[in-house]
Structures are given as C-alpha cells and as structure tokens.
Amino acid sequence: MIICEIGLNHLGDCDYADEYLTQILDSPADAVTFQLREKAFYADPAYAQLTLPQAYYKEASRRIRKSDAKFGVALADEEAMDFCEGLAPDFYKVLSQDITNFSLIDGLVRKTDKPLFVSTGMSNLDEIGVFFQHIRPHGERFTLIHTQLTQDLESVHLRAMPLLSREFSLPVAYGHHCDNLKVLYLSLAFSPSDVFFYVKGGRTSAHLDEGHAIALEDLAEVVNSMKILPASMGQEVKVKMDNEIEKGREAMADKADG
C-alpha cells in the first residue's frame, strides 16, 4: 500500500482535515491515516490545539469506507483503543516511541484483529529484537516500518530494510522522513511491503511534519510515479534482445521521409 499520513498536519481544524481527506481520496493513494497521540502529548500547550472531535473521526471513517481507500490509525493512546475500534479501521500503526510499550501493543493484539505496523524510527537492532521476541507468537500480524527520525539524507539507510527482513523474518515497510523527496522513489528499489509518507496542505508552512511531507497539490503525480516505477526493476535476468531503440529511430526516420 501507498499510505498518506495526515498525522497532526490538520492542525486541529476540521475544515482543513476535510481538505486533506478530499484530495487524498481523489488521488490514487491506497490508504490514509490519522494520528491519535497520548494524553501527555496534548497536555503540552504547544500541542493542545492539535485535536479533532470524536464526531469528526466518525465522519472521516464513513467517508473513507465509501471510497476505495483503506483507513489506518496511528495510535499512542491506549485508552482510545475501544473508540478507534468503533471506527472500523483497516490497520493500526504504532509510533516508534512505543515499540516497547507492550501494554499498548498487547492491547492492540488482544482487542483487535487488524494488521499492526510498528515504526522502528528510534531503535537499534537490539531494541527491535526485544520487541520481536515479545510479539513473536503473533508475528503474522506485524510489519516493521523502517524510518529514521531525521531529515538528513545520509541517515536514511535504505539498506537497513533487507537487513531487518533477514533478522526478523517480518515484512518491512518504508516510512519517509527525509527532506529530499526523491528518496521516496529510491526506496522502491528495496521492495518495501508498504510506503508511508506525510502530506501537507497549503495553509501554512508550520505543520508538525513539514519538511518531509508531500504537498497535497503534488500528491497525485507522486503516487502515480510510485505505482509505475517498480516496473523498471523487472526480473533478475539478462537475455538477448532486439535493439528496440534503433527500431524506433528507423521508424521515425521513415515517417519523416514519407
């Protein structure tokens, strides 16, 4: 899936959130996520306004279910789990801060039957190993998301994706946080199971996920490219073939002469 993350870039404004939903659902993206953070996060005055009413999420869920897209929730508030289940999401995402929050993870395993994506953003292999050993009995439910919580190009380490796959025998998705948006395309060469990236509207340049987000106005072009480009990887073969480029040149020359 190609998954557009609204995150908290709606800025707590229902009309702005509607702009996101409309453009994402009109695009060829496969899924959309909202983010519900823990209560301590919203207790910070800097983030207190980044909430949407429960009624909004219910309406958003209804809109998404009427479309061809899937609906995901990035959930950090264990107390909101029952409410989120009532929204009938297709999957959940666990933020990188919670990779060893086993109360939250066990609750998702116990209370839901949905696929679970877990971000590895701040973790090394040892920490991911602790997580893996804990969830191993339910491993078929889980996908790791390789991401680095920095916008620095040299810190993306896309080669970590096959490493994680070998080490833990789990599907590995890519989560984009780099300010060079072309890395999104490069990530496809490592065959991620899914790709997560944030989106941003045009009302402000002060979104929480600003520098690494895809502008809504560019979304359709980016997603279309991401769906087409994997065809260029082809198969692990090298066979004799005709020079199709030369044939094309000859055809053009003949047409010009005619």
Image: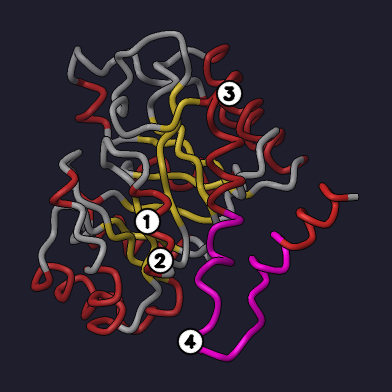
Question: Disc 4 on helix, strand or loop?
Answer: loop
Residue 148 place in picture, x, y as percent: 20, 50
Q: Earlier in the sequence, mark 3 or mark 2?
A: 3
Q: Tell me the kind of residue under disc 3.
A: Tyr
In the picture, the disc for residue 186 is: 1
Question: Disc 2 on helix, strand or loop?
Answer: helix
Q: Residue at x 30, y 14 (%)?
A: 206
Q: Which residue is mark 4?
A: 236
Q: Is 132 displayed left or right of 139 in the figure?
A: left
Q: Which residue is mark 3?
A: 56
- Determine the image quadrant of residue 164: bottom left
Residue range in magenta is 227-249
Q: Residue at x 18, y 19 (%)?
A: 44
Q: Tell me the kind of residue under disc 1.
A: Leu
Q: Disc 2 to disc 4, how far (Cα)?
A: 13 Å
Circle 3 packing at 10 Å, graded few (<14), some (14-19), many (20+), is few
Q: Is 131 displayed left or right of 143 in the figure?
A: left
Residue contact at pointers 2 and 1, CB within 8 angstroms: yes
Q: Which residue is mark 2?
A: 189
Q: Disc 4 to disc 1, how far (Cα)?
A: 18 Å
- Nearer the viewer's eye, disc 3 or disc 4? 4
Circle 2 packing at 10 Å, graded few (<14), some (14-19), many (20+), is some
Residue 227 place in picture, x, y as percent: 59, 55
Is 170 or 112 nearer to us in this picture? Answer: 170
Rendered position, 77 above or below 52: below
Instruction: Name the residue furthest top.
Output: 203
Q: Disc 3 to disc 2, how far (Cα)?
A: 38 Å
Question: Disc 1 on helix, strand or loop?
Answer: helix
